[in-house]
Image (cartoon, grey):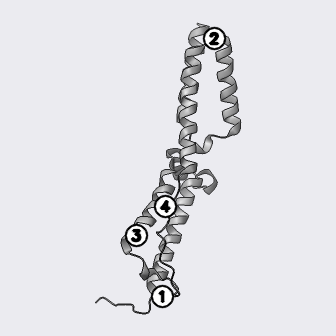
Amino acid sequence: MRQRAARNSFALLVRVVDDLCLTDINENILKILMDFICQLVSRGDLLPARALRKKVVEKCYLKQRSLLNTKILLPSMAVTTHKASLLDFKSETIAEQMTVLDADLFQKIEIPEVLLWAKEQKEDLSPNLTTFTEHFNKMSYWARSRILEQEEAKDVA
């Protein structure tokens, strides 16, 4: 009976680790998990240790990948003496770079954040969703401002 309860508890722990959000993973949690894995190995429980370690390594890889996700910058322009304007860039390049920025932020949003936002609407509980929303609002304002500041504005009737 005790062994069965221990197996069920361990299976629950592995599921909890698998369901951890990337924002939940920090040094303290990793240390606790790695200490527990070491205890399992030292007791000879190699199969459970391997299963838990696999989940921890997967989460660490995903977290590292999200932190190292580099942003692609706009291609540099030839050195000129005039100040660059929005019209100096191809619209396709600008749209592509804006999409890269949006996608990077969007991919960091996790389901629990959205659910918490729907329930609580507290920015500190949904940091990635808040960052994405703020970015969207800033980019929208920037695009409107750049359009309106053009001297050769065209009215379409």
**What's the distance in space between the residues labelled 4 and 3, CA to CA?**
11 Å
Residue 86 in the image: state x and y as whole percent. 45, 80
**What's the distance in space between the residues labelled 1 and 4, CA to CA?**
27 Å
Task: Estimate how packed mark 4 is, as few (under 14), some (14 to 19) or many (20 or more) residues with alpha carbons within 10 Å.
Answer: few
> Which residue is most to the left?
157
> Closer to the camera: disc 2 or disc 1?
2
Depicted 24 relative to depicted 152: above or below: above
Q: Secondary structure at mark 3?
A: helix
Mark closest to the chain's N terminus, 1 or 3: 3
What residue is pinned by disc 3? 93
Mark closest to the chain's N terminus, 4 or 2: 2
Q: Nearer the viewer, residue 34 or 138?
A: 34
What residue is pinned by disc 1? 149
Callout 1 amino acid? Glu
Task: Please say if the residues under marks 2 and 3 sit with CB atoms less than 8 Å apart.
Answer: no
Residue 84 in the image: state x and y as whole percent. 50, 82
Q: Secondary structure at mark 4?
A: loop
* Numbered marks: total: 4
Q: Secondary structure at mark 1?
A: loop
Residue sitting at 58 percent across and 31 percent down? 56
Q: Nearer the viewer, residue 40 or 2?
A: 40
Depicted 65 relative to depicted 50: above or below: below
Task: Estimate how packed mark 2 is, as few (under 14), some (14 to 19) or many (20 or more) residues with alpha carbons within 10 Å.
Answer: few
Residue sitting at 44 percent across and 88 percent down? 150
In which quadrant is the C terminus drawn?
bottom left
Callout 4 amino acid? Ile
Task: Please say if the residues under marks 4 and 2 sit with CB atoms less than 8 Å apart.
Answer: no
The numbered disc on residue 44 is 2
What residue is pinned by disc 4? 72
> Closer to the camera: disc 1 or disc 4?
4
Residue sitting at 71 percent across and 36 percent down? 28
**What's the distance in space between the residues labelled 2 and 1, CA to CA?**
70 Å
